[in-house]
Amino acid sequence: MFGSKVRVRLGRLDALAVACDDSQSEFGEILGAAITIQSMNRDAASKWQETWTSQRSPPEGGWDWASIHDLSKRKTDEFCVAIWHEDTTLCGLFLLIVDGNSIRLKAIEGNPDENHPLKRYVLPIGIDVAERLAEALEREEIWLVEPADGLLELYVNELKFELHEIDGKRICKRRV
């Protein structure tokens, strides 16, 4: 018999898969491109290690996605997601956390290659998947946790998030 934590994780993984599929269909149609949005796997971790060289450092990017992926696999509430173009170019990675009444987008990063084919779409895709997962799991908000300074204006003025400080951390929140 599966334990309750395993059942919870499997249910959330199912909801995430549907959210990824729906977002993938919508953005694929909008962009006229074959994109894949799915839970991060060994292929994505390998591609990240092989092709993403960056001088970035968190919260501007530069996370160790292989480690984040390994740690998230053991938790019922954390999910690492990969965004691919044509199943060959790893364009983005992000971490979602189910917490209380929210889905938190803890980290998100686009491929450091300035010419990757989904440039400027990694963030909208990550937010879209977070919203879809929030709806599926009946959560009320999505949060962007410790957003990069350079993106605050975008989050607040264009994407209509509200900036808050909670326990000394900046959070951008938006109701679903």
Image (cartoon, grey):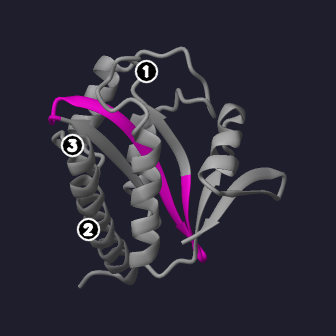
What's drawn in magenta, residue-wise?
A: 86-105
Residue 9 location in percent, x, y? Answer: 36, 71
Q: CA distance from mark 1 to mark 3?
A: 18 Å
Q: Dot 2: what SS? A: helix
Residue marked by disc 1: 112
Amino acid tagged 3: Ile
Query: Reading the chain from its start, which is encountered first: label 1 or label 3?
Result: 3
Q: Which mark is residue 166?
A: none
The quarter of the picture where the N terminus appears is: bottom left
**Image quadrant where one finds the C terminus:** bottom right
Q: Nearer the viewer, mark 1 or mark 3?
A: 3
Looking at the rendered structure, the kind of residue marked 1 is Pro
Q: Indicate the secondary structure of the residue bearing disc 3.
A: strand
Q: Residue at x 43, y 53 (%)?
A: 72
Say which residue label 3 marks: 35
Compared with 89, 100 (above or below) is below
